[in-house]
Amino acid sequence: MPTIHLIDDDQDFLKYFQSWLSRKFKNAIIKTLPTRNSSLNEFKHGIPNLILVDYNIPEDPRSLRDYIETVRTDFRCKETKVFLMTVYEYYEIMNVCHLIDVFVPKPFDPEKVLEDMKRFIR
């Protein structure tokens, strides 16, 4: 059963997108998490197949770069795909782009993101 981590500080977005994704991936476990640290804490319960993480989470003690590097260096995460959601332009976040699998500019079309997700989750 695939596991997806949705990481964002916008609780309304998390509720909406989790509900929407649950209808599209009926067999997936979709965890909504307010910080990158909370995502790493969930790793003890299982490694996600896919992570959708927001670029800017002001209250998060862990930087985005540190989070993604931690995921990338954890041998258990070798198959985990990282989608980065952001309102920033691609050129503004070049420092982390080489670490992600899919760039998702906000606002985004959920159907387009779903297409990208389906390439990695069956």
Image (cartoon, rainbow, N blue to C red):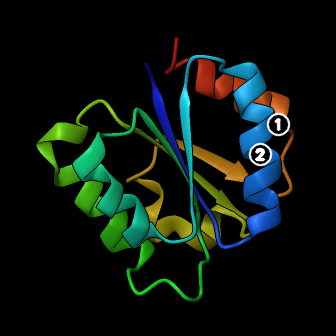
Look at 59% across and 79% down and name the residue there.
57
SS for tag 2? helix
Disc 1 target residue: 110
Nearer the observer, 92 or 82? 82
Nearer the observer, 10 or 107? 10
Nearer the observer, 31 or 111? 31
Q: In this image, 109 relative to 91: left or right?
A: right
Q: Residue furthest top?
A: 122
Could you tell me the amino acid type at mark 2? Phe
Could you tell me the amino acid type at mark 1? Pro
Nearer the observer, 44 or 4? 44
| Above-or-below relation of 83 to 80 | below
Q: x%, y% of residue 24? A: 74, 21
Q: x%, y% of residue 1? A: 43, 18
Disc 2 target residue: 17
**Chain-order first, disc 2 or disc 1:** 2
Look at 82% across and 37% down and name the residue there.
110
CB atoms of marks 2 and 1 within 8 Å? yes
| Above-or-below relation of 25 to 18 | above
Q: x%, y% of residue 32? A: 59, 54
Q: x%, y% of residue 116? A: 64, 27
